[in-house]
Amino acid sequence: MSKTFSLDVVSQFDLSEMNNAVDQTVREIQTRYDFQGTGSKISYDKDKQLIAIESNSELKLETIVGTLESKFIKRGLNLKHMDKSQEITQSSMVYKKSIPLVQGLDQDKAKKITKLIRDTYPKVKTQIQGEEVRVTSASKDDLQNVMQLLKGADLDMPLSFTNFR
């Protein structure tokens, strides 16, 4: 009887860690002297997976984004979960920026991951299951090598590994 081992490659973040990172950023903005009286705000919409930031200057807005990034790093969240490609909008004296949060693997990204794994480790089997990729092998070492390969690859998506059995 041959035993097989498996793991799932996913692109997800911990919602409680995300809440904590945004809450810590809110508290820091409220206590910092340079943000007093500027009307700077940050909010997190869990349903839309969107972080909304507003302030009275573009410089302060970028400072808030930098503070949020530092909180992400401290909480162990990957910065690739933030899609910062949207432009800053201005209406009267209020600058706004929306940062959508990215999670989940679409078909193209999943195919890219499976192709990379199959090209490097032909004995390892991959299977796309919705928004995750199941990787199976007869050797735990192969699975750990696949994990190292994906961590070292320059992919434009944040990856995490679950169900390592």
Image (cartoon, rainbow, N blue to C red):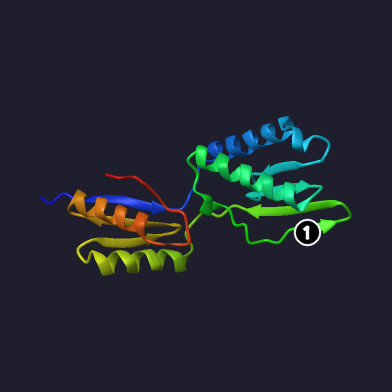
In this rendering, the count of numbered labels is: 1
Would you place residue 79 above or below residue 25 in this image? below
- Residue at point 41% right, 64% down? 110
Q: Secondary structure at mark 1?
A: strand
Say what amino acid the circle numbered 1 marks: Thr
Q: Outermost residue toward the top? A: 31
Instruction: Please indicate whether residue 1 sits to the left or right of residue 25 in the image.
Output: left
Circle 1 crowding by C-alpha within 10 Å: few under 14, some 14–19, many from 20: few
Instruction: Give the percent coordinates (x, y) of residue 145.
Output: 25, 54
Instruction: Please indicate whether residue 154 sits to the left or right of residue 85 in the image.
Output: left
| Viewer-closest of 151 and 59 | 59
Could you say which quadrant of the image residue 71 lies in? top right
- Of the 4 image quadrants, the one containing the C terminus is top left
Q: Outermost residue toward the left? A: 1
- Residue at point 82% right, 40% down? 38
Instruction: Please indicate whether residue 59 sits to the left or right of residue 19 in the image.
Output: right
Instruction: Give the percent coordinates (x, y) of residue 76.
Output: 47, 40
Could you say which quadrant of the image residue 114 lies in? bottom left
Instruction: Give the percent coordinates (x, y) of residue 56.
Output: 82, 47
- Residue at point 59% right, 52% down? 101
| Viewer-closest of 121 and 65 | 65
| Viewer-closest of 120 and 32 | 32
From the image, tell me which residue sits under label 1: 89
Would you place residue 26 above or below residue 127 in this image? above
Instruction: Please indicate whether residue 155 sits to the left or right of residue 37 in the image.
Output: left
- Residue at point 66% right, 50% down? 50
Instruction: Give the percent coordinates (x, y) of residue 67.
Output: 62, 42
